[in-house]
Image (cartoon, rainbow, N blue to C red):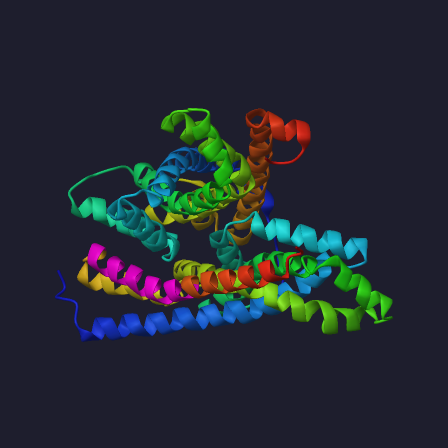
Amino acid sequence: MSLQLDFPAVLERWPNFLAGAALTLELAAFATVLGALFGTLAAVGRGARSPLIAGACKVYVETIRNTPLLVQIFLVYFGLASLGLKFSAFTVAVAALTINVGAYTAEIMRAGFEAIPRGQIEAAEGLALSRLQIYWHIILLPAIEKVYPALTSQFVLLMLASSVCSQISAEELTAVANYIQSDTYRAFETYIIVAVLYVILSLVMRAGFWGLGLVLFPRRRRLGTPL
Amino acid sequence: MGGHLNINHLMFLGQGALWTIGLSVIALIGGGIVGFVIALARISPLKSVRIASGVYVQLIQGTPLLVILFLGYFGLAAIGLKVSALAAAGASLTLYVSAYLGEIWRGCIQSVPKPQWEAAEGLALSRTQRMMKVILPQAIRIATPPTVGFMVQIIKNTSLASVVGFVELMRSGQIVNNSLFEPFAIYAIIAVVYFAMCYPLSLFSQKLERRMGRGRSNLAPA
């Protein structure tokens, strides 16, 4: 029982690791932006007057939140294929991750909407703001500010979860690792390096969201507290 | 291609579903024990213990479960231990679950109102007595809804054990698919089975949360 580690043999493949990390970030960025939009729409839809729209949004959120991402990815991958549609693994991965993170975003945003005091909306109506203005200035922006920390940790989790896309051969970081370890037979070293890279990526993302928060929410920066 | 879905395939999927539940229970118990230690270490009076446990949590929470599973599977083999897929998956999930449950429970312990800690100290209870007799019984009440909610995450995450060859629900679905090649239908069935396992837990967690919320609002100062 002796453990012999040979990191240099694996580290000389650093361009591959970097390319994988870049693709992981790219996947996460696409899915974060699209998922945030999609999820916000679903959260708005859950509060719709029409029971059909509200019900459809609830079914979407609950279905996604109670099934594994791996199953969802396979369903999108083979579902699109069985419809005769051919997409790249990257497109399928972005679509599946967007659908997935959209459901979690919807749930977080709903909590944000519910936290808006009724009086604020009544005051805005009293000031004769239009429906659209109320939705944007009184409900949406303050809600986002309130749930910003929860949203950002969800997006970091999404970046980590994108590792599952290796299973449909999207060439992100974990897929690169699988390839390198089968090439070098240095599995342990490979996955340690990849684990370190993921930790770095998640720290970078958290720092980025923290900085973005400072820019987006100047009131929070000045007062140090959310609304 | 290879015939139609028949009763044998369904039996095989059922067996996989049982292993999913088994692996989830292993992860919950193992992760619960380690997570409890982590939660206590995170609020230890010793700074070094707090830092070490904090680094542990950050490292695990910053790494995808899939990579932890590969590390467990190949790592244990690299140090010469020949382990089964079940042992590798169980160990990896234990690590993963412990980091999350540890953080959840730390929050619950710390959310026990400050006067309770002070009163226990004022009654000259030792640190252990204060924890066991005053803080933990209240923390467990607070911790129940998020812990039940996290069990849903555990069940879903056991699907990743399929990639190291452990035959749980997801892997048994892949095996059935290899012989039938009807991926959409089979993965849809798998999704329904996962939903049937997870949704009752989600509802239960929400119900507990609402009940807690009501209890707490009754206690709120006027």
Residue A216 x %, y %: 55, 26
Residue A225 x %, y %: 65, 36
User: Count the marks: how many?
Assistant: 0
Q: Is residue B75 above or below residue A116?
A: below
Instruction: Report whether B145 appears left or right of B176.
Output: right
Instruction: Report whether A200 appears left or right of B47.
Output: left
Residue B121 x %, y %: 84, 66
Query: Could you tell me if residue B84 is visible in this image?
Result: no
Q: Is residue B8 above or below residue B64?
A: below
Q: Nearer the viewer, residue B171 or A39?
A: A39
The range drawn in magenta is B184-201
Quadrant containing the C terminus of chain B in the rendered view: bottom right
Q: Nearer the viewer, residue B166 or A203?
A: A203
| Residue at 38 percent of width and 25 percent of height | A130
Query: Could you tell me if residue A143 is visible in this image?
Result: yes
**B199 inside magenta stretch:** yes
Instruction: Report whether A32 appears left or right of B10.
Output: right
Q: Is residue B33 above or below residue A81?
A: below
Q: Is residue B7 above or below residue B63?
A: below
**B146 inside magenta stretch:** no
Quadrant containing the N terminus of chain B in the rendered view: bottom left
Q: Nearer the viewer, residue A28 or A165?
A: A28
| Residue at 46 percent of width and 25 percent of height | A127
**Residue B100 falls in image quadrant:** bottom right
Q: Nearer the viewer, residue A51 or B32?
A: A51
Residue B96 x %, y %: 55, 58
Main SS, magenta region, reads: helix
